[in-house]
Image (cartoon, rainbow, N blue to C red):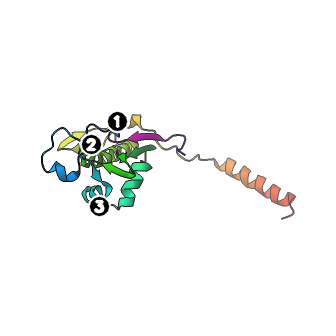
Amino acid sequence: MHGIHEQVVPVGSAAPAGPVVPAESAAQGDQGRQVYITLTQAAKLAPGRPSINCLWRWARKGVLARSGRRVRLGHVRIGGKLFTTAAWVSQFGVALAEADVNYFDLDSAPVLRDGAAVIHNSTSAPRRPSSPTRTAEQRQAAIERAERGLKGMGV
C-alpha cells in the first residue's frame, strides 16, 4: 500500500518501556514508568486540537511528509484501545516538521531552533523532478503527428 519511494518513520517506541500507568497515576509521581494516555487525552494536548479520529489515523496510517517519508505517531495497543504518550505526540510533530524541512532547499536559509541558527543541507532529501520541457521543434512535430492521426481517422 505504500508508494515506491515512501519511507515509513515510526515516531516513539511502540514497545512498552515499563508497566502501563493510567494518566491519573502520573500526578502521583510514578518515576521511571511510561505514562500512557488515551487518544482523547492526546487530542487535548496536541496543537490545534485535532479530532480523536485524526490521532487514530496518525497512529495507524501516519502522515506522508513532503519528502516522501511516512511519519507515524508512536502508540501501543492494549486490548482494543490505542494509547500514546505526551512525549510521542510532541516527537511526532517534530519528526513531521523535520521531514518537511528536509524537502525544501535550505542551503542558504537558516532555521532558528531554540534561538540558534541551524543550517540544513538539502542533499539528503530528493528534490522533485522538474517537468520535462520540450523545444518548439518538438512541440510542432507533436502537433503535426496529432493532425495526421486525426486526418487518418477522418476527423
Magenta-colored stretch includes residue 9: yes
In the image, the segment drawn in magenta is 6-12
Name, please, the residue furthest toward the left: 28
The tag earlier along the polypeptide, 3 or 1, is 3
In front of the other: label 3 or label 1?
3
144 is within the stretch colored magenta: no
**Image location (x, y in percent) of residue 155:** 83, 65
Q: CA distance from mark 1 to mark 2?
A: 10 Å
Q: Which residue is nearer to you in this view: 144 or 24? A: 24
Work out whether mark 1 precedes mark 2 in sequence or the reverse, and give the earlier one.
2
Q: How far is the residue under mark 3 from the one under mark 1?
A: 30 Å
Return the residue nearer the eye: 90 or 37: 37
How far across and how far down the image is residue 5, in percent? 51, 40
Q: Which of the two discs, 2 and 3, labels the residue nearer the N terminus?
A: 3
SS at mark 3? loop
Marker disc for residue 121: 1
Crowding near pointer 2: few (<14 within 10 Å), some, many (20+)?
few
Separation of residues labelled 2 and 3 (CA atoms): 26 Å
Residue of label 3: 48
**Amino acid type, label 1:** Asn
Using the rendered image of the protein, determine whether residue 62 is visible from the camera's viewpoint: no
Looking at numbered disc 3 in the image, what kind of residue is underneath it?
Gly
- Please give the label number shown on residue 110: 2
Q: The residue tagged with tag 1: helix, strand or loop?
A: loop
Amino acid type at mark 2 = Pro
Q: Are marks 3 and 1 in contact (CB under 8 Å)?
A: no
Q: Secondary structure at mark 2?
A: loop
Label 1 close to label 2 by CB (< 8 Å): no
Q: Residue furthest bottom?
A: 155
